Image: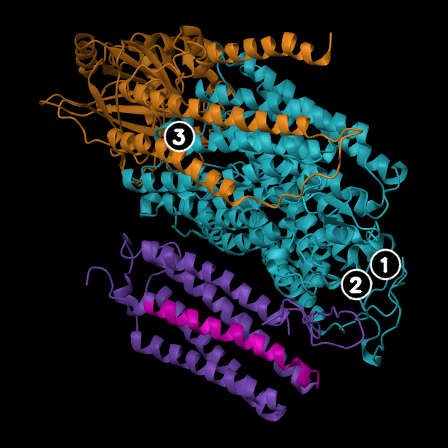
Chain colours: A orange, B purple, C cyan
């Protein structure tokens, strides 16, 4: 086989199949976190624009790369070939041409870009659902504001929204309910619904999205926010209007089991291990230091949205949370607000027990977990 | 001369050209230096330093009027006092000019007089600044009181540090002159110190205007 | 090699400590040298050591991400790794290698005997070395920096007891970068003065080789980019340690101010990194195509235009911070504009190769690889200027892919092109071409295997700076490919190191002009004599050395001149006697030593260390100032 035909018979099909494979695989896995599989109006518009640019870029890229390879092969020095090439110093027409050509192409890209920027920044629609997302280290608090005399709802890690209606997110790093309590920068990102928007302390950023399909979509903090940034996940549960309304109503109710009714578990939770220093299980309208647990059992994930809410996971978490999500929480059991105490996250109740405080047994953790899992 | 090194690279023989001039005497389209190496270097450094102060001044402007508690500028500033010390600093520039003129004439006696006067004026300014800082801190303003405290002290503090550096530089020139190490060929090192000194003065004019003279927000 | 003769008159009282060191060989000479060539070698070797360190950090990162929920590193260690990887590659590899090559070749290319300020030059090197050691010492002194190479506030600026980033890492980071900034600023001033004042007769600005031009542009960029970041870092340090409130949102401070200051530095910094690479291939492509650079003037002006426009695009790093549609539209458009001069350069490089007589040496392969890979990086860059698309891509692996195509596919490939091109000049021996080809192909394949899949990972939702990912997200296969690719790159770097070490003693002897070069550095012996040029050259055209060897016939074809390069050989008879060179000096090292000591004093807030540092620094400056001129 000559060199040339080898190229034609083997190389070309291989390259062809490979590029086809890349194109097909390009849209990627069905992982609920894939910006190439949009499920929201905004993400779809972004994806369309992106694909338009990708086609142009691919064209230019192939042209330049192929041109480079071609020039290197076509003009390579060979024995017998004249190595005294013509000395061209430049060509004004060509140079002006390839200055203008990119400018024209960029203008073609710029027009839809600018129009989509303004499209995505349109003011809130009147029927939009307004939700406040507060970025914490390392979990998300979602607040559904008080409405029609009904109290607000505070929940964590799972964002319920209705399908087909605009959701207007107010993104906060300084918890509006806890003055002076500011966190670091986080970034709110649900790839299949919209691009990301930073949660900037001291600023009032917003982001809206309109889900087109019911389902569960993954979100993840996209701005490095310290030790457990990788674990700061959440999910968006897109429901029909009715389901959404039912969910919201159920969240507004009081706890399924009050602390008093919980008996020994309630005592462990509130008194012996002082979980109530950071959490509440009694009132879904309270914003406290840790996630509001009033309706914990209605959620499917917990712990930064990283773990499934199962009894086994929950027991492990209660005993030794830092072994599941890295946290700076060694000192947390010494108490909040004590000078010199650095505390981010949930402490271990089996390691580093401060003097005079009890170490938790597994059966105690099981009791607490049973109680929490009863909080539908 | 401290920071800037006299270029100690002399080009090929035969003729010993002036420092930094590598091309004297050659014809053709060769470049000719408008500024000697050390002077050009100082100008470049000052251009860079402009951005250093520029960034601090921008931060100060951004945070004007954002103090949440603690004393505000209006409660603290003693404009006549600061104007007086600013005037002294500006006058020091005059001293610098006279010192340079003296050394260029080879008049070391006058040079030492004026360079010392310049340094003293500078020191007076720094003393005024120290007095102002202690006064403010007595009235409850420190770095961690509010944004005004943070941005005010850091900006004026870094300027003060620049002035102190300048004073050290001037004093070392004075010392070199007394030891007879400051020959006429080193007059340029005085000129370079002068560039720095004038720059520090000019920056103070900007800072003084921005901090003290611009109407305070909310007035 | 002839050393400087003519013992200078040493006056009585300057005997002893102030006498300038004399050694020009041996270990001591490397500590006190002021020879721009030796300093250049020091820079490049130091940067290569840091390149290996940064590479090891990258390999650890890749091992951790080989599969879901990796356990090679803890979260804290991982965060230190990516912070130090980025910081190292930008500040301790990219900048010092460029400065090192510039140090060696800018004076040679403009026909000068040294840089304008030899001792300040050495001072800059020591600051970079000691600053790097200072930053790396944090690993042994309570934990390395873990706030990211960008160090966003309030994460980095919150006081220690807030618990956001416990440990001294961020303090080492801020102090270390301020130190390195001092070094870069002095180098920048030196380059500018050298390029403006030290050119040989006839070397007008528009005759300067493109590499020298690009070094001049980045010197200006460095000069103006360092102050804003110094201010930002100072504020962070004060916030952490002295209770200032610059970035404390609860007190009204604005973390966005930090981002503006950082990226006003950070974006020109990207061009500081890439422009030397563009300069290098603008040297190698004409030499290995035996044609002049196509459109020299427009290539130079494009470089300058990139330098200017680079100041107007910083906020494209902040498209998702909520700047508002008008601002982000403006910055998006400005970013697109940069693609124009960049595209012009790419087409001009292609025009240079086109119709040439292309010798596919290792250096040429790296140069051609640069064009292709940098183009891909540039195109994904344009995708970021499409702001809505950027809101999906920023802070994901897509961005990681993009800037590695620019900085690895661009800068690193170009640097390797430069290594293979200039090694014979520096050491007098050729690098082995067979190992070179292996070096190129493994690096090229490994690079694409590592970074091409990252585009997809990012689009499929994998965020950056995450020490683990959940299983079942469909990211496993590509992450494994990436890890394999990174080890192929590591192998490739190993091949280069072996090649460089072996060739230094066993390589084929190069001769003065092994590539049939165009610029002045090829007109002198390899390695060059200490005084560079026995007689200061006088140039009459662009690529003057080439025109001493060749002329063109009526059709524009090359015609060798019978006396090719004769002038150079005639000059070689000169033994360098009587050429006065600056003497070595201890004091750049002493002065530079004061800075990290002050850095430790600041980090540990210790007055005694601070006093020690101040004494060392002031003594260094004082002794430097009164050091006899020769």
Residue C71 can be seen, yes or no: no
Q: Secondary structure at mark 2?
A: loop
Question: Label for residue C551?
Answer: none
Residue ID at (85%, 40%): C504
Where residue B97 sits: x, y (%)? Answer: 51, 84
Considering only vertical position in the picture, is A233 above or below B29?
Answer: above
Mark 2 or mark 1, earlier in chain: 1
Query: Label 1 belongs to which residue?
Result: C24
Report the chain holding disc 1. Answer: C
State the quadrant of the N terminus of chain C: bottom right
Of labels 2 and 3, the one closer to you: 3
Badge 1: few (under 14), some or many (20 or more) residues near its Cα, within 10 Å? some
Residue ID at (31%, 42%): C327
Q: Nearer the viewer, residue C103 or B86?
A: C103
Residue C80 can be seen, yes or no: yes
Q: Secondary structure at mark 1?
A: loop
Q: Which residues are magenta?
A: B180-209
Considering only vertical position in the picture, is A98 above or below C484?
Answer: below
* Image quarter of residue C256: top left
Report the chain holding disc 3. Answer: C
Q: Are marks 2 and 1 in contact (CB under 8 Å)?
A: yes
Query: Label 2 belongs to which residue?
Result: C584
Question: Label for residue C390?
Answer: 3
């Amino acid at each position: 086989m000559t060199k040339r035909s080898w190229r034609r018979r083997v190389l070309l099909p291989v390259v062809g199949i490979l590029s086809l494979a890349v194109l097909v695989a390009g849209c990627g896995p069905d992982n609920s976190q894939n910006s190439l599989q949009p499920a929201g109006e905004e993400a779809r518009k972004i994806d369309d624009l992106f694909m338009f640019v990708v086609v142009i870029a691919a064209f230019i890229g192939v042209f330049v790369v192929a041109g480079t390879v071609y020039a290197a092969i076509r003009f390579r020095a060979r024995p017998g070939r004249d190595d005294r090439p013509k000395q061209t110093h430049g060509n004004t027409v060509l140079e002006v041409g390839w200055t203008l050509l990119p400018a024209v192409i960029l203008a073609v890209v710029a027009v839809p870009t600018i129009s989509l920027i303004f499209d995505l920044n349109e003011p809130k629609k009147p029927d939009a659902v307004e939700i406040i997302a507060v970025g914490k280290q390392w979990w998300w608090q979602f607040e559904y504001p008080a409405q029609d005399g009904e109290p607000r709802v505070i929940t964590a890690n799972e964002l319920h929204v209705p399908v087909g209606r605009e959701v207007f997110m107010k993104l906060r790093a300084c918890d509006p309910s806890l003055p002076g309590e500011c966190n670091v920068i986080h970034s709110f990102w649900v790839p299949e619904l919209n691009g990301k928007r930073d949660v900037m302390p001291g600023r009032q950023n917003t982001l809206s999205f309109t889900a087109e399909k019911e389902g569960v979509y993954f979100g993840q903090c996209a701005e490095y926010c310290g030790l457990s940034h990788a674990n700061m996940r959440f999910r968006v549960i897109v429901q029909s209007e009715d389901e959404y309304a039912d969910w919201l109503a159920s969240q507004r109710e009081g706890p399924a089991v009050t602390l008093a009714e919980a008996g020994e578990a309630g005592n462990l939770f509130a008194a012996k291990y002082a979980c109530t220093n950071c959490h509440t299980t009694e009132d879904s309208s309270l914003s406290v230091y840790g996630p509001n647990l009033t309706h914990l059992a209605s959620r499917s994930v917990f712990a930064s949205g990283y773990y499934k809410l199962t009894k086994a996971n929950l027991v492990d978490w209660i005993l030794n949370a830092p072994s599941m999500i890295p946290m700076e929480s060694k000192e947390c059991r010494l108490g909040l607000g004590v000078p010199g105490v650095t505390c981010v996250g949930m402490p271990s109740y089996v390691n580093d027990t401060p003097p005079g405080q009890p170490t938790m047994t597994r059966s105690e953790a099981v009791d607490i977990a049973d109680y929490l899992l009863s909080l539908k | 001369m401290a920071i800037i090194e006299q270029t100690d690279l002399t080009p090929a023989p035969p003729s010993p050209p002036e420092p930094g001039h590598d091309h004297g005497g050659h014809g053709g389209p060769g470049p000719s230096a408008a500024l000697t190496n050390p002077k050009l270097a100082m100008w470049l450094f000052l251009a860079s330093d402009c951005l250093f102060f520029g960034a601090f001044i921008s931060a100060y402007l951004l945070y004007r009027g954002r103090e949440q508690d603690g004393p505000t500028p209006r409660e603290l500033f003693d404009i006549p006092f600061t104007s007086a010390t600013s005037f002294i600093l500006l006058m020091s520039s005059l001293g610098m000019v006279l010192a340079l003129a003296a050394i260029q004439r080879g008049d070391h006696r006058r040079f030492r007089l004026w360079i010392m006067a310049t340094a003293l004026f500078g020191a007076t300014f720094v003393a005024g600044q120290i007095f102002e800082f202690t006064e403010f801190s007595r009235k409850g303003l420190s770095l961690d009181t509010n944004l005004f405290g943070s941005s005010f002290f850091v900006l004026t503090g870094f300027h003060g540090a620049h002035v102190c550096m300048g004073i050290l530089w001037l004093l070392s020139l004075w010392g070199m002159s007394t030891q007879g190490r400051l020959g006429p060929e080193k007059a340029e090192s005085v000129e370079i110190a002068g560039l720095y000194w004038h720059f520090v003065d000019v920056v103070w004019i900007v800072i003084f205007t921005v901090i003290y003279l611009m109407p305070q927000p909310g007035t | 090699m002839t050393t400087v003769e003519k013992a200078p008159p040493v006056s009585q009282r300057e005997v002893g400590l102030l006498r300038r060191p004399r050694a020009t060989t041996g270990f001591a000479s490397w500590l006190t040298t002021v020879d721009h060539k030796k300093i250049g070698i020091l820079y490049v070797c130091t940067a290569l050591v840091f390149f290996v360190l940064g590479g090891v950090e990258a390999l650890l990162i890749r091992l951790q991400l080989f599969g879901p929920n990796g356990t090679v590193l803890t979260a804290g260690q991982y965060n230190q790794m990516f912070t130090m990887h980025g910081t190292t590659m930008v500040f301790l590899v990219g900048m010092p290698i460029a400065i090192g090559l510039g140090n060696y070749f800018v004076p040679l290319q403009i026909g000068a005997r040294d840089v304008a300020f030899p001792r300040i030059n050495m001072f800059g090197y020591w600051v970079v070395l000691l600053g790097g050691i200072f930053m790396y010492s944090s690993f042994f002194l309570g934990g390395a920096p873990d706030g990211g190479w960008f160090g966003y506030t309030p994460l980095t600026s919150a006081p220690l007891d807030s618990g956001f980033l416990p440990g001294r890492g961020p303090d080492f980071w801020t102090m270390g970068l301020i130190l390195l900034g001092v070094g870069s600023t002095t180098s920048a001033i030196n380059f500018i003065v050298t390029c403006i004042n030290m050119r040989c007769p006839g070397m007008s600005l528009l005759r300067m080789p493109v590499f020298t031009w690009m070094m001049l542009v980045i010197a200006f960029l460095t000069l103006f980019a360092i102050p804003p970041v110094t201010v930002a870092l100072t504020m962070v340090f004060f916030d952490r340690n002295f209770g200032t409130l610059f970035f404390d949102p609860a007190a009204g401070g604005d973390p966005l101010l930090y981002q503006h200051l950082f990226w006003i530095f950070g974006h020109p910094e990207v061009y500081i990194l890439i422009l030397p690479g563009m300069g290098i291939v603008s040297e190698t492509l004409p030499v290995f195509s035996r044609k002049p650079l196509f459109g020299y003037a427009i290539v130079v002006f494009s470089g300058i235009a990139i330098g200017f426009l680079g100041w107007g695009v910083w906020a494209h790093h902040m498209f998702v911070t909520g700047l508002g549609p008008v601002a982000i539209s403006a910055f998006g458009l400005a970013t697109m504009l940069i693609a124009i001069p960049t595209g012009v350069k790419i087409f001009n490089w292609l025009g240079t190769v086109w119709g040439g007589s292309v010798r596919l040496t290792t250096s040429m392969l790296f140069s051609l690889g640069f064009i292709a890979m940098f183009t891909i990086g540039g195109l994904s860059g344009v995708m970021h200027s499409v702001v809505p698309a950027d809101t999906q891509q920023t802070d994901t692996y897509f961005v990681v892919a993009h800037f590695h195509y620019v900085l690895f596919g661009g800068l690193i490939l170009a640097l390797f092109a430069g290594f293979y091109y200039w090694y014979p000049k520096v050491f007098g021996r050729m690098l082995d071409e067979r190992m070179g080809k292996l070096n190129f192909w493994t690096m090229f394949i490994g690079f694409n295997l590592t970074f091409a899949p990252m585009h997809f990972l990012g689009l499929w939702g994998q965020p950056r700076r995450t020490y683990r990912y959940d299983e079942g997200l469909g990211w496993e296969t590509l992450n494994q490919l990436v890890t394999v690719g990174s080890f192929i790159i590591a192998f490739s770097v190993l091949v280069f190191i072996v090649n460089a070490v072996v060739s230094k003693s066993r390589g084929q002897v190069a001769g003065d002009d092994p590539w049939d070069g165009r610029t002045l550095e090829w007109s002198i012996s390899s390695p060059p004599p200490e005084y560079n040029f026995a007689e200061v050259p006088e140039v009459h055209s662009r690529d003057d050395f080439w025109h001493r060897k060749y002329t063109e016939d009526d059709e524009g074809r090359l015609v060798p001149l019978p006396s090719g390069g004769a002038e150079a050989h005639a000059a070689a008879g000169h033994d360098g006697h009587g050429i006065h060179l600056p003497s070595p000096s201890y004091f750049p090292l002493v002065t530079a030593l004061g800075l990290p000591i002050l850095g430790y004093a600041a980090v540990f807030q210790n007055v005694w260390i601070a006093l020690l540092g101040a004494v060392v620094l002031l003594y260094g400056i004082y002794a430097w100032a009164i050091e006899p001129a020769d």
